[in-house]
């Protein structure tokens, strides 16, 4: 039996060589058990400290969108952020049943990460072996790109969950088509639907379908009896076409939004040292160069050893899936960035992270097929522990309540809320949103979107039309030098960066109308000023 599991060569027709289920085995040996346990472990890693980190700019955009009605979201999706509109709709529904705070905002991402880890265990079991699947799930759980995605109220965690699910459906569909299992077409229909839904959650995920096309082509070229794989290839082509047709409305709706959404990337793409650093380190390993070195070496070793050592070639299917899934999306995004317009950002390739974890797991479990699994267990455990220890400082920094871009938002709103709590009952306050630090074409409406409680009941002094009405992420506002209408107010608050014109212009306007500065506090780059008559 051991020989049958370890000595099949790359010419085998099998693309999912899983022993038939044994109904007599103990329940604890069922494949779902290790997958569930790894999923729980991933949940705990992702959940720890999720509530502590301050809100970021992207999460403020999530909250600006999620608070709208579904018709208002539909209106916005046709103007801006359409690529995230499905995720925004999900968050709208989620936050309609749970109270909003940083934990509930991020909890769906935490759950998505746990599900992805569990699915990766099953994927690894099917294309390699059970230990490889478990190790892949554990490595995945502690990679900084995963913990970053799970700690954000954004769609990135969902992107890798759908990526693993889509790949798992592909493997099963190919196997059933090859073996002429009745109703195999149902799996291809599922493939098309999962590919479409995953793309609606994050459009870049559609590149994984292209990577799967490369994998299916490799299977056709390397199997001794390719007839079954040829049938599967035709089914893949049909399923990919259906998925493309389903995603086409999203592509058409968002094709003109890139300049509005990605202006911050710039207009030219320079493939320089900074980009290389981003690809090799930041893309999967946070800012830890040591972890990146260990991870990259292990991934490369896992791929090369699996291909080169005959006794490991039963696991070559994992390589044939993982390598295109990592390389094809990266090459495609870089090519478009160089030739057309800049589209590359490390976060946008989050959905490829599970396949890096799978390649690392191939290295950590390689000795199992060559020597004894007990030795592999010890080596794999040691490898996972080393990766976790190297990742820990990055994960801890991700969850830290201070030292981040949004730290001053939380501190400023805490101060504002404390000051307003001391006002006499019935006080009427107005808020003047100044320039957002480091993003001066934006206003601190971002801050109020992330921490709305501190601004409850305040009159917006520069509002022309709310964001929900204009179908944009942010409201239409008066020019910053226009004097606001402060009639009927007891107190005016300014929140924003200090620039050449603000808050000096507002202060001069209010003082000319009989107001004076009551208090002023600086929180890093944010100024919080109160004015009274």
Image: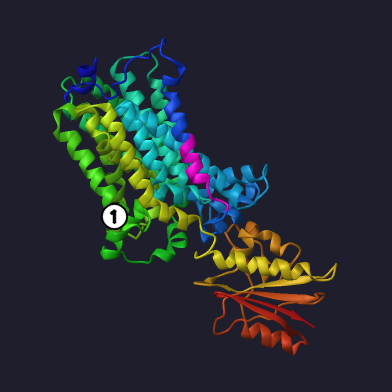
Image position of 142 (left or right of 464): left
Q: Position of residue 246 (x, y in %)?
A: 44, 37
Residue at 64% of width from left, 46% of height from top? 95
User: Which residue is under mark 1?
Assistant: 280
Q: Which residue of the protein is positioned furthest toward the bottom in this rendering?
A: 512
Q: Main secondary structure of the magenta part?
A: helix
From the viewer's side, name the closer residue of 259 and 511.
511
Q: Position of residue 98 (x, y in %)?
A: 67, 44
Give the answer, above or below, for where 164 lies relative to 418: above
The C terminus - image quarter: bottom right
Q: Can see residue 238?
A: no
The quadrant where residue 120 appears: top left
Q: Secondary structure at mark 1?
A: helix
Q: Which residue of the protein is positioned furthest toward the top in this rendering?
A: 24
The N terminus - image quarter: top left
From the viewer's side, name the closer residue of 178 and 275.
275
Give the answer, above or below, for where 239 lies relative to 253: above
How busy is the neighbourhood of tag 1: few (under 14 within 10 Å), some, or many (20 plus)?
some
Give the answer, above or below, for where 135 lies relative to 143: above
From the viewer's side, name the closer residue of 10 and 67.
10
Q: Position of residue 498 (x, y in %)?
A: 57, 80
Q: Position of residue 514 (x, y in %)?
A: 78, 87
Q: Can see residue 204?
A: yes
Residue 371 within the segment the image draws in magenta:
no
From the viewer's side, name the closer residue of 199 and 79.
199
Residue at 67% of width from left, 44% of height from top? 96
Give the answer, above or below, for where 173 lies relative to 296: above
Q: Which residue of the protein is positioned furthest toward the right in this rendering?
A: 425
* The magenta segment: 40-51
């Amino acid at each position: 039996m051991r020989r049958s599991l370890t000595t099949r060569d790359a010419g085998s027709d099998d693309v999912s060589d899983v022993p038939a289920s044994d109904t007599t085995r103990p329940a604890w040996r069922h494949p779902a058990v290790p997958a569930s346990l790894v999923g729980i472990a991933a949940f705990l890693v992702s959940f720890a400290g999720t509530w502590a980190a301050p809100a970021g700019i992207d999460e403020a955009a999530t909250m600006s969108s999620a608070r709208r009605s579904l018709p208002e979201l539909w209106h916005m999706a046709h103007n801006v952020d359409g690529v995230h509109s499905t995720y925004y709709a999900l968050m709208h529904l989620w936050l309609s049943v749970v109270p909003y705070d940083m934990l509930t905002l991020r909890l769906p991402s935490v759950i998505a990460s746990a599900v992805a880890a569990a699915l990766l265990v099953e994927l690894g079991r099917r294309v390699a072996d059970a230990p490889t699947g478990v190790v892949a799930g554990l490595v995945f759980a502690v990679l900084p790109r995963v913990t970053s995605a799970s700690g954000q109220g954004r769609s990135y965690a969902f992107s890798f969950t759908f990526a693993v699910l889509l790949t798992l459906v592909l493997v099963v569909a190919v196997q059933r088509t090859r073996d002429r299992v009745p109703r195999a077409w149902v799996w291809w229909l599922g493939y098309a639907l999962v590919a479409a839904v995953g793309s609606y959650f994050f459009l870049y995920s559609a590149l994984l379908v292209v990577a799967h096309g490369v994998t299916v082509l490799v299977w056709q070229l390397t199997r001794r009896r390719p007839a079954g794989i040829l049938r599967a290839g035709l089914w893949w082509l049909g399923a990919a076409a259906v998925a493309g047709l389903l995603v086409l409305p999203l592509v058409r709706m968002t094709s003109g939004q890139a300049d509005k959404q990605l202006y911050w990337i710039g207009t030219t793409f320079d493939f320089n040292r900074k980009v290389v650093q981003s690809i090799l380190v930041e893309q999967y390993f946070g800012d830890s160069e040591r972890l990146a070195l260990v991870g990259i070496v292990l991934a490369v070793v896992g791929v090369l050893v699996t291909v080169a050592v005959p006794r490991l070639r039963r696991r070559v299917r994992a390589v044939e899936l993982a390598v295109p899934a990592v390389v094809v999306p990266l090459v495609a995004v870089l090519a478009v960035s160089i030739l057309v317009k800049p589209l590359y950002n490390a976060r946008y390739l989050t959905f490829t992270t599970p396949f890096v974890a799978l390649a690392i797991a191939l290295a950590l479990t390689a000795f199992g097929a060559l020597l004894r699994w007990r030795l592999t267990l010890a080596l794999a455990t040691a490898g996972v522990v080393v990766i976790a220890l190297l990742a820990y400082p990055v994960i801890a920094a991700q969850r830290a309540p201070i030292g981040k871009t949004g730290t001053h938002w939380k501190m400023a709103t805490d101060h504002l809320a404390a000051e307003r709590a001391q006002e006499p009952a019935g006080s009427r306050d107005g808020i003047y949103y100044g320039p957002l630090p480091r993003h001066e074409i934006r206003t601190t409406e971002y801050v109020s979107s992330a921490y709305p409680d501190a601004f409850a009941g305040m009159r917006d002094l520069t509002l022309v039309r709310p964001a929900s009405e204009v179908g944009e992420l942010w409201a239409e506002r008066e020019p910053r030098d226009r004097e606001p209408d402060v009639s009927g107010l007891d107190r005016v608050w300014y929140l924003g960066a200090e620039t050449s014109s603000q808050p000096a212009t507002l202060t001069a306007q209010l003082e000319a109308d009989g107001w004076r500065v009551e208090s002023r506090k600086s929180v890093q780059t944010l100024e919080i000023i109160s004015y009274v008559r």
